Amino acid sequence: EVEILDARTRDKLCFLDKVEPQATVADIKNLFSKAHPQWYPARQSLRLDPKGRSLKDEDVLQSLPVGTTATLYFRDLGAQISWVTVFLTEYAGPLLIYLLFYFRVPFLYGPRYDFTASRHRVVHLACCCHSFHYVKRLLETLFVHRFSHGTMPLRNIFKNCTYYWGFAAWMAYYINHPLYTPPAYGDEQVKLALAVFLVGSKTRKIPYPTRNPFTWLFLLVSCPNYTYEVGSWIGFTIMTQCLPVALFSLVGFVQMAIWAQGKHRSYLREFRDYPPLRSPIVPFLL
Amino acid sequence: HWAQRHRELFLRVDLSDVRNPDITITDNVLHFRAQGHGAKGDNIYEFEIEFLEPVEPKPVCRMTQRQLNITVQKKESNWWERLTKQEKRPLFLAPDFDRWLDESDAEMELKEKEEEKINKMKIESRVPKDPFKHLKKGYLIMYNLVQFLGFSWIFVNMTVRLFILGKDSFYDTFHTISDMMYFCQTLALMEIMNSLIGLVRSPLIPSVVQVFGRNFVLFVILGSLEEMQSKPVVFFIFYFWSITELFRYPYYMLSCMGIEWKPLTWLRYTVWIPLYPLGGLAEAVCIVQSIPIFSETGKFSLGLPNPLNVTIQFPFVLQIYLIALFLGVFVNFRHLYKQRKHHLGPKKRKMK
């Protein structure tokens, strides 16, 4: 049997008898949601100890250290939304918003600029790069990414979209502005920037912890996908010579550095003979 | 009788008055031969055991009057499902229940031993052999002393001038006090450094916010606009800042020296209750008064076209800053209040 209590109040929420020993946590979650339909399985966090870790869906009841009546503690994770939905919205937004500014849709700039085109080549190039970047991300989300959890809390979508869409609008406004100033060092700067940007976009691979590293950056860095991402945006910054883009790169870098440190630490914990020379995101430094 | 741990095996032979024990291990086989008094009387007892997995060929024996204890080291740290290589248990071999542990209990025993070791190491390292300890203390005491003197000078000066000149002292406060205030607030950057390098145990972010907030008002708003410098609000800002610091720095100084003067502690954790919001209010008034001037002069504002491809409208930035200021004061107020309860609440408490 399985008994489910609230992790905070210790109220008895549900009692499931006739649960097979081979049942997984996922099965238990399904049974629980039948009794409490407002808590669908993705929202449930079941644990053996109120302050302990959440149990994984694949865990089998038999393998858990419980007696004949298992006591599980429940925590409501809040309304959930699937990762794929969040990512698609996050990335589609900047793609479209940038294009709105690029084509100078009415009400963004003065009426005499509506639907005009910029006379700088770099602005067209920037639009291609920016759009390419987000199209790539959308395709990756649809076909490549594999996520460990299917969902995330609902409020994340608002937070993330505000961030991505806000910055996209802020950047796009200045880059596509009629009074835009192209890079100080002209074509050379743009060529260099484009090279950096492409390098950052091409070699990005999503690392799985068990896969053998192919690219050389894996030798130096735990999370090369983040390194390349930052590289791309630095390239874009140099290309457009636009302060908002620099700020976006900086904020992104800080966020990714924090994530990379976390991943690095969990790799160190998981793999005993982890190469000591590797750093989380910037080779040798960070 | 036998028992095991992850790294070793325990064998016990119940023989008393053991004489001429011959215990060797060759080719992973333990040869035991001894004369003693056992189950079948006084005799020569011998047996052989081939171990399941390789062991170190150096058994350690301890003899007591009634038994022989043999400890054998396993070559590899493993949990054996049985002692002997052969599947059938030898008739003379039985589990030693006195020393028996199953695998998970043995693991726990190991873990406990590890923890004990770690605790011992921690206790040893808690006595910090810090050669710079006195230097650090001296530096902190000096820093707090200098700041205290600076702010006392400011406070005394402003009070005296208030008595002598009355309201007129408001208008040239900046002119007389600013140099010392610049000095003290620039020096306050060290406070951030102290927190950053761990010299002081207070959290980094509140001190960054406070120092940044004050310096922003001092250097950006007041320092760059002459028109603001002759406004009366400057007097209030400086006065509120200095009174709060009059209590904060001596408190820190004494706590560095390990002295606690209860009245001072009480003052330090109480005086901010009226002063902190008042200081925030004065700063807000100052910013509000400065916004029209920044709009008019366009100072610190950046318009298109420019090489950075960004526009900065400083009055707008200041308006956002005002909102942040109120939020910050509110959040910090709660934090300070909690701190106050922590320090003044319980009767006997070790100082942080």
Image (spheres, rainbow, N blue to C red):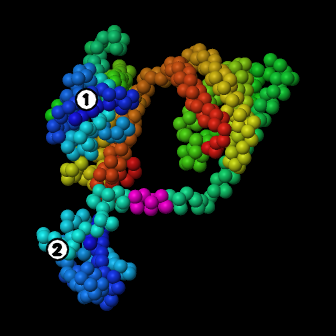
Asked if residue B333 lies left or right of residue B25, the reply is: right
- Name the front one of labels 2 and 1: 2
Residue B232 in view of the camera: yes
Chain letter for the residue marked with disc 2 in the picture:
B
Left or right: where A167 falls relative to B93: right
Task: Tell me: residue A275, above or below residue B325.
Answer: below
Q: Which residue is mark 2?
A: B90
Quarter of the figure with residue A117 = top left
Secondary structure at numbered mark 2 = loop
* Residue B300, percent from left and from top: 54, 25
The residue depicted at 77 percent of the width and 31 percent of the height is B155
- Look at the image and say whether residue B114 sits in the magenta stretch: yes
Q: Chain of mark 1?
A: A
B123 vs B209, nearest the viewer: B123
Disc 2 from disc 1: Cα separation? 50 Å
Q: Where is residue B295 drawn, in percent x and y?
A: 56, 16
Q: Estimate how packed mark 1 is, as few (under 14), some (14 to 19) or many (20 or more) residues with alpha carbons within 10 Å.
A: some
Q: Residue furthest top?
A: A111
Seen from this angle, which residue lies furthest left? B87
Name the one closer to the observer, A109 or A171: A171
Looking at the image, which residue is at 61% across and 61% down?
Answer: B131
Give the residue furthest to the bottom: B20
> Could you tell me how many numbered marks the image carries?
2
In the foreground, A45 or B164:
A45
User: Is A49 included in the stretch rendered in magenta?
Assistant: no
Quickly name the residue at label 1: A15
The segment highlighted magenta reads: B112-121
